Amino acid sequence: MKGKSTFILLLFSILFSLTLRAQEINVTGKVTSKDGSPIPGVSVLIQGSRNGVATNPNGEFRIAVPKAGTNLVFSLIGMTSQTIAVNNSQPINVILLDSMNDLDQVVVVGYGTQKKSVVTGAISQVKASDLENMPVMRIEQSLQGRTSGLTITTSSGQPGDGATLRIRGTTSINNSEALYIVDGVQVGGGIDYLNQADIESIEVLKDAASAAIYGARAANGVILVTTKKGNRNGKMSVNYNTYLGTQAPARKLDLLNATQYATLYNEAQFAANPNVGTPRFPNPSQFGQGTDWQAAVFNNSAKIQNHELSLSGGGEKSTYYSSFGYFDQDGIVATSNSQYKRFTARFNSDHQITKAIKFGQTIGYTRVNSVGVGTNTEYGSPLGRAINIDPLTPIVETDPARINLPIYTGNPVVRNAQGLPYGISEYAQSEILNPVAALAVAQGRGWSDKVVANAFVEVEPIKGLKLRSQGGVDLAFWGSEGFTPIYYLNSINQTTITSYNRNSNRGLFWSLENTISYNKQINKHNFTGLIGYSSQKNKGETNGGTKDGIPVTNIKDASLQFPVSRANDVFYGGEYLNTLNSIFGRLTYNFDEKYLFTGIVRRDGSSRFGPNNKFGYFPSGSVGWVASRESFFPQNNVVTFLKFRGSYGVTGNDNIGDFRYLSTVSGGRNYTLGTSAGLNNGVSPDALSNPDLRWEETSSTDIGLDATLFGKFTITADWYHKKTSGMLLQIDVPGYVGNSGPIGNIADLSNRGFELELGYNKRMGEFSFRVAANGSFLTNNIDFLGDEKQFLGGQTVTPQGLEVTRTMVGHAIGSFFGYRSNGLFQNQAEINNYKNAGGALIQPNAKPGDIKFIDLNGDGLISDNDREIIGDPTPDFTYGFTLNAAYKGFDFVMLGQGVAGNQVFNALRRFDLPTANYTTAILDRWRGEGTSNVTPRLTLQDDNKNYSRVSSLFLEDASYFRIKTLQVGYSLPTQLVSKAGLSKLRFYVMANNLVTFTKYTGYDPEIGGGSFGVDRGFYPQARTFFAGINVGF
Amino acid sequence: MKNKYIKCTIAIVAMMQIFVSCKKDFLELTPRGTALEDNFYKNETEVMQGVISVYDVMQWGTTGGYTMKMPLLSAASDDNWAGGSNASDQPNWVAYDNFNMDPRIGPQGGLWNKNFSGINRANLILSKIEGATTLSAPFKARVTAEAKFLRAYFYFDLVRWFGRVPLITAVLPTAELYTQKQSTPAQIYAQIEKDLREAYPNLPATISSAEKGRISQGAAKAQLGKVLLYQNDNTKLAEAITLFEDVNKVGNAYGFSLVPVYADIFNPANKFNSESILEIPHSNNAAWGDWGWINGGEGNVGTQFIGMDSYNGDTYSSGWGFCPVTLDLVNVMKTDPRFDATIIDGAALKAGGATYNARYQNTDYFIKKYAPLKAFRSASGVAEQNWPINEIEIRLADTYLMQAEALVKANQNPTRAKELLDAVRGRVGLASIPATLDNIYNERRLELATEGHRFFDLVRTGTAVTVLGPVGFRANKSELLPIPQTEIDITKGIITQNPGYN
């Protein structure tokens, strides 16, 4: 903190130390838009210097430059920057183009770039200008709400946690992770290692036509990230960005207070046994409000900060870009145990060795330190405990009479800094412990060091012919450690021996890619051909150990070096290895940028594929027609650009695990022998082998159009149909085979969808604004799971393992599965009238106030067979919009984002634990005829299984709309800051997750990760307020 | 200068191309640290581990449904009911008890899978033994014999339960996984006999105390004798008699003799006693606790099944109340000296202050052989899954009675037949009776009560329909279980259903 304030002081001292500079040539000019209207407020900067001015309301400027040949850089938010050399012709008139309408901009397409106007695939792009000054914790999140076709569902609000990212739906029942390519290098484990300020652009290859160049890895879609390069012929530009923020939970649950808790417990007890006599809590009001456990685990002022410093520039021969970043975030839940710190450094450079030979490299290093807590589990996460524990138990026991109870004096209980014991609940059971005490004994952290680098040589012996060799590497080291002291949390959660474990892992991925491309224009025929060869290897190892009984009490002192007995000393390890060998080619042709064609074929060979299917071919073709370039297209000001696109292609998913085609053998098939009963290890094959095993295959059809209306309004629309076949499942074999079937390419699913991206630009004098909106409809359907197989099991809740989701033929993957409730029985007559054909009661155990379950199969009783698909955690519709506005030095950004048509299963309360607390929604329970038709009566004797049957009662609408980001900034006038030797000085304030509109009653309706759509006490995203500064030198 | 650079770079690029393309084995990887079927079974230790995995199947209690032979077959017979908490506790057992199995309900799925798992493992290890080059001749001979015995053992269960099953004597190639046809019982019996005849000469006469539980020559001969006798084919009696005589004669090569005190046979402390010929060991050594895969442990879950539910009292541990003893058996045994060693009188226990819950089909009489005993309750793992109580599948009294039966049927040596019958009766102080078939069958019921022999005895002697007809047994149907429907579905009808179950 101290260092930071010093820095700001320094900044201001620079600002006010004005200096005069020599003046040689006065340059004047005017900046207009395409339609001729003047653009005020455009920054005009002498390239490589800190001198600059801004255009006046008439779009005019006047600037003194040292000499002819100097370059001027014209830039404005939302416009494509231009660099113009000063020569003797004056005035300099510049036409700036709206960046979003600019059809001349390029998109990265994998092994090359393409002009946007001639692209035939479905590619979404997010550019540096969209991401600048947008604090996001992970780069993936920056795509949320910004592009169509992506469903991004945050895995949790824990710092450093990722998101479930799906490009055009879930493509596989196994692994649907997109392929990430950063500067041409495949990276594993997501892209959270990247510093946001280093990113030049992110392209999302959505259809097979664009992704097919990545063949067997592309079925789940491809995300291409390009990092920044320096500018040629520019002086050094230095940028420093920082922000500080404070985070808080956006919502707390209303839980029962102690008096309400005791009262309702008594009621439940009485309902179960009217002859109970004295209730468990004879005087509920004595407990008052009790403990607010949420307050004990939530932090309303968790800090977040970020610093980024970058230097870039270049000369005639070389360019460079280097940066350093530091990001530090505390969690809003259990802050002491939920933190993330990231340090990043990057160096990118390009060198023109000769006119024909170019060399370049990028290298990024990232170090991450983090600690985390359980984020969505009913088995003892801090929030899960806070929700479920009784409000009667105090956080810290202060009552002297209780402190001296044997449970506190006779056990190694956990104590606070004052030496007072944390309260131990007499009521809560199972994993529902005092969350504060439990955090004190959960000691551990994780770390990683990662280097992603590439280097290339490119030779252009004749114009248009490029030979390029590129090597890439992703080297990662990561590990974690954890320590368990001797503790007593309650009678079933205690340890008698310390335990320390530590593991280290190393992963090395390398790739070598050689490509030859040739670009030729003959009259109006444009050809680009590419052929390439690629090899890659991915390997890694893990090793770790556990030592029990080390003589320390804190992780800070723990070490694997302590000597312990052999029995207390465990070592473990593992390794992985896979390789991929590929050849690929692409032919791009267009006639007059009017008729467009791209054809791609890639052949991938993988060590993961069985010997009978070692190589897969992945072809794709796409065509486009720019109708607006036809001579017969009526010249008009309404439709200024119109392109139709169509594509079909086949891609693969090689994320099928290593060596799954082989038959492995395992031990544990034991037999006891001998009079003294000795155990003998038996070994047998686990399953049959499958030499035919291969990739999962996705074929995809895409039809789309791009249009510009009135020169300002852009539309991109796509319809697609993606079909995945041969998803890996264990093959069912006859029982007489006597072993499990092999893993085979069995199952099929499909995704269909429609996507729309809209943009609009408007400039009125010094006021300009831009709106970008997108929406995506998605339908996922499981088509086939095997000859006799109708479903696969999914998520379960509670130790009873109640099924909550199933992946079922004819429905979306991981759909909710359960009973349907039809309100509550209001009286005995309703129970008696609920009869089957034989006259017997369908729910003979029901009492008034219990759920009336629908007898879906009509067999006259309620059984497991009365369950069906009752909902879907995946949204049918996702949408987002960004609003940018600027006036003079002020700028404003709002990003809104939402989903619709999905549900969340609310499993916040552990129904299997009768002493678990409730939310205040239970106050509206059924208490007599007509009091509720939604919330069943309270009872400890749930014979009707109101709570132990997964039913539609617990499904809630999880549609939401969120003001994701709201930012207001002010940039000091260029003339002013340039006098201080700066090129830019901007201040801003911002809010993240400011408002969320939803009917969902839990903390957060957006529940991704492993417990997708099932809320077990989900760690919510924070609401954050930031203030930040951008400085350019 | 410029050209030189270009050439250099092109050369480098070209070299890189060669560098990667030359490695032809780039995609041919072998996993390290993972044992593969292809490279395991290299030496005697690994082959023995393969053989152990075949033995392992003998002690399985669940394979898609509970299939513990002793209690399950007792429930099917007139000795016991199915029991449990209610009729839907183990519907497969209740269906077998009442002979209203259908292709989807009944114990067939588990029994089919269990025995074919054993056959698959036996076939696999036989092929590996064949291919191994480092095995000593005696080792090879013994493990080959064991694998063949075990294959025969599993097929004998299959043929008795299902009649027509696919006869698989080698690891199935991928192309043939779905195309196996059922063989006739005669073909299957022929293979069983062949395996057993090839097995017993190479098995040791005695098993060292550390290896007790492995198959001995005596066990293989007894099993072959039993297989021959069970076929009801008089031409096979002579061989059966010879085999039984080898096992039963005084001073036999295997050290078999009747245990003097009847009750001692089933004392869990008395494992591998002199009367035990084929014994399936159990222990709590694997300290198991996974209800999804009980077979991973080594305990006898059957013991847990037959115990009295929520029992609170001396001697016994609590069980789940399966297989209550029928009053029919109680009545015929009331005066038999073996009653106390065979049947627990619940009423008497209650009178002594013990309590337990009456469950489905309760008679207040429970199986005593293999009952859960407090003293043997496992302290490690989940106790219910880890009962260290062995099952005796063939014992000397059984082979005595089988030899006596064979002799009477073959009209040979009536003196020897009577001698054998008298020896069984004499041990428990019963007087000599004539060695007629009826007397021998009756003795079998009493001597071997609740040990799992009764049901197949009723079937092979043709008395099943008389005895079990009242509870649902139908001739020419209930002798066999239905073929699991899943087998018919997955083979698209190549596997066909047993008569009466379509």
Image (cartoon, rainbow, N blue to C red):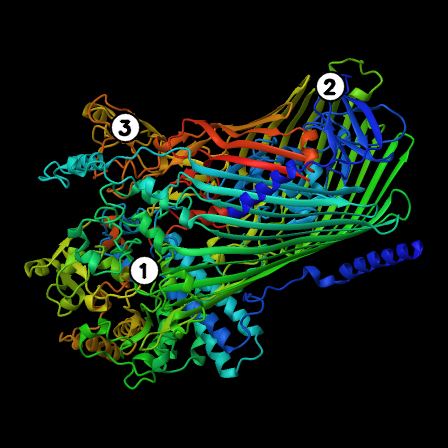
Residue B98 position within the rendered picture, expressed as x and y whole percent measured from the top left: 27, 49
A107 on left or right of A1006:
right
Compared with A963, B173 (above or below) is below
A893 on left or right of B343:
right
**Mark 3–mark 2 CB contact (< 8 Å):** no
The numbered mark at residue B68 is 1
Image quadrant holding the N terminus of chain B, namely bottom right
Residue A9 position within the rendered picture, expressed as x and y whole percent measured from the top left: 57, 41
Q: Could you classify mark 1 by the number of other residues whose Cα lies within 10 Å: few (under 14), some (14-19), or many (20 or more)?
A: many
Extreme residue toward the left, this view: B351
Task: Give the secondary structure at mark 1.
Answer: loop
Image quadrant holding the C terminus of chain B, namely top left
Check if mark 1 and mark 2 are on a common chain. Answer: no
Of residue A459 and residue B413, the one placed in the foreground of this image is: A459
Given the image, on which type of amino acid does mark 2 rest?
A: Gly
The residue marked by circle 2 belongs to what chain?
A
The numbered mark at residue A711 is 2
Of residue B129 and residue A373, the one placed in the foreground of this image is: A373
Given the image, on which type of amino acid does mark 1 rest?
A: Met
The residue marked by circle 3 belongs to what chain?
A
**Mark 1–mark 2 CB contact (< 8 Å):** no
Q: Could you classify mark 2 by the number of other residues whose Cα lies within 10 Å: few (under 14), some (14-19), or many (20 or more)?
A: some
Residue A194 position within the rendered picture, expressed as x and y whole percent measured from the top left: 61, 46
Residue at mark 3 to residue at mark 1: CA–CA distance: 38 Å
Residue A1000 visible in the snapshot: yes
Extreme residue toward the bottom, this view: B251
**Disc 3: which residue:** A836
